[in-house]
Amino acid sequence: MKKYPQELNAGKQDGEKAVMAAIAKMKEPDRSLAKRVHAIVTKTAPSLVPRTWYGMPAYSKEDKVICFFQNAGKFRARYSTFGFSDKAKLDNGRMWPTSSALKGLTASEEGKIRELVKRAIS
């Protein structure tokens, strides 16, 4: 929580550095997953600005977080997650998922992430 005000003021270059620093602090396999997710998101949506959000890698549009990676180690969880904020344009009826558990990434999962990120920023 203490880092949040600083995170809000980070520019694109500072945000990229902060994301890479946050990823570097992660233990494996979270680090590898986060690096891959970062590469997918930045390639799929270069308009999104990398930044940290409560210390987690996140990607924003007009200063609003659209999606984020939450590593398992941060909360001693069984799996990492890739999630979307309420600013993402994923609405589909009255109920839809806003995050997905990640234990690994195959080409299929990478494709799903690309598809969701494209929808989220449309």
Image: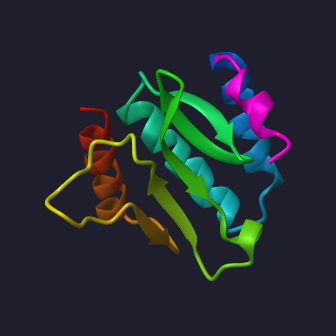
* Residue 26 on image: x %, y %: 77, 58
Q: Say above or below: 14 vs 34.
A: above
* Residue 23 on image: x %, y %: 72, 48
Q: Residue at x 40, y 47 (%)?
A: 86
Query: How many labels sit on residues?
Result: 0
Please identify the quadrant where the C terminus is shown.
top left
| Residue 117, picture quadrant | top left
| Residue 52, picture quadrant | top right
Magenta residues, start to end: 1-11
Q: Nearer the viewer, residue 64 or 39?
A: 64
Magenta-drawn stretch contains 93: no
Q: Say above or below: 74 vs 52.
A: below
Q: Residue at x 39, y 40 (%)?
A: 87
Magenta-drawn stretch contains 6: yes
Horizontal side of 92 relative to 52 (left or right) equals left
Q: Say above or below: 85 vs 50.
A: below
Horizontal side of 104 relative to 117 (left or right) equals right
Q: Residue at x 61, y 48 (%)?
A: 35
* Residue 84 on image: x %, y %: 43, 51
* Residue 13 on image: x %, y %: 68, 17
Task: Give the farthest residue toward the front.
Answer: 94
